[in-house]
Image (spheres, rainbow, N blue to C red):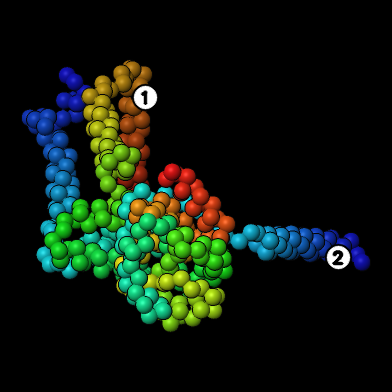
Amino acid sequence: MTQTEGATARPELRRRHTARWVAGVILVVGAALVALLATSPPQSATEVDTPLVGQAAPDIAGATLGGGSFDLAALRGRWVVVNFFASWCPPCQQEEPELVAFAYAHRSPGDAALVGVVFDDAASSAHSFMQSTGASWPAVIDPDGQLALNYGVRGPPETFIVAPDGTVVVHLDGPVTAASLDHWLVLAKQGRS
Amino acid sequence: MSASSARRSPGRPGWVGWMPWAALAVVVGVALGVGSTHGGPPATVAERANAIDALVRCPSCDGISVADSSASTAVAIRQVVLTRVRAGQTDAQIDSFLVSRYGPGILLRPPVQGWTAWVWLAPPAVLAGAVVGLVAVLWRRRSRAPAPVSADDRALVQRALAERAGAGRAGSEVVTAP
């Protein structure tokens, strides 16, 4: 190789070297990102401070997915968990088994009741979704979204805890767990005692 | 004799120089007045509902009004706004209902109170300050006395003018020479 050929080959070699380094860094960062997303804990519910907290719960009355009817006012005197959900929403799918566990744990008469409100979903899809998970609590159909509006719901899942006197005491945004619902219920009962 | 009167045309009153600025202020004032009241209140129930919808944030979208969204929450809010307008409620009553459900963030135009008042008051205050500052600077510049000119400077200028005049004559002679 002559001296001139060597001089032109050196920058080419340096460029290839740099490209290999850049590709390697991108690969490592990408792999780290994938690992981080794969191992991050699932999204969980957070308490949100909305104007409805401390106010009388708007009434929830109407037809249920099972073909019956429901009226929130009839549950006055009990703690009620109101859950806005949709079958198409992944966080709702995530929390559904937890809600089933919560409902089972509170199945004794007079204990906290659970009611669902269908959010922007076809009744048939919501019904299939509940049946597939073994959910047996009443779920009210909200075809024009007025129940969601009355509760200031932005997107499912959102959950409200209503005190026996009909006051909204907690508003949770995101998928709940049976344990977190129990936690909020205990706190709410303490706040009321 | 003051500097400003020295620059003023003989026989012209001082306020004449401010006439263009006064005219500009009148034009801007009229334009802002017409712009802020243009169209008047909406005539029909639908127009009023649409006007309210345009100022309500879609709760499940990013930064667009319920008038511009087809999300289910936006559709529900449009419906409730229309129902309440038909029932004869005022804009403030409808806004108040939506705020009682979603909080003040549901309104695209924040209320003029507390910290949000600055959002409304700051722009006109800054504009007014800028206008006052501009007028003050122009006023000071007009009334400032010119820098004293020394005899050397005058001689320098005279010499330059004479050289320029001489060069001009020479150039024209060259051009006009047969």
Toward the viewer: A99 or A78? A78
Where in the figure is residue B41, as x and y percent of width and height? 13, 59
**Label 1 sits on what residue type?**
Leu
Camera-side residue of A98 and B64: A98
Asked if residue B160 lies left or right of residue B94, the reply is right
The one nearer the camera, A79 or B92, is A79
Nearer mark to the viewer, of 1 and 2? 2
- Mark 2 belongs to chain: A
Q: Is residue B169 visible?
A: no
Question: Which image quarter holds the N terminus of chain A?
Answer: bottom right
Question: Residue A3 location in percent, x, y?
Answer: 89, 61
Residue B76: which numbered mark, if any?
A: none
Can residue B10 be seen in this snapshot? yes
Task: Evaluate if marks 1 and 2 touch, with contact meaning CB atoms under 8 Å apart.
Answer: no
Q: Report the residue at 33% width, 17% height from top.
A: B151
* Three-letter residue code for mark 2: Glu
Residue A5's label in the rendered image is 2
Where residue A69 sits in the image (x, y, percent)? 34, 74
For residue B156, the mark is 1
Q: Residue at x 41, y 57 (%)?
A: A78
The residue most toward the front is A109
Q: Secondary structure at mark 1?
A: helix
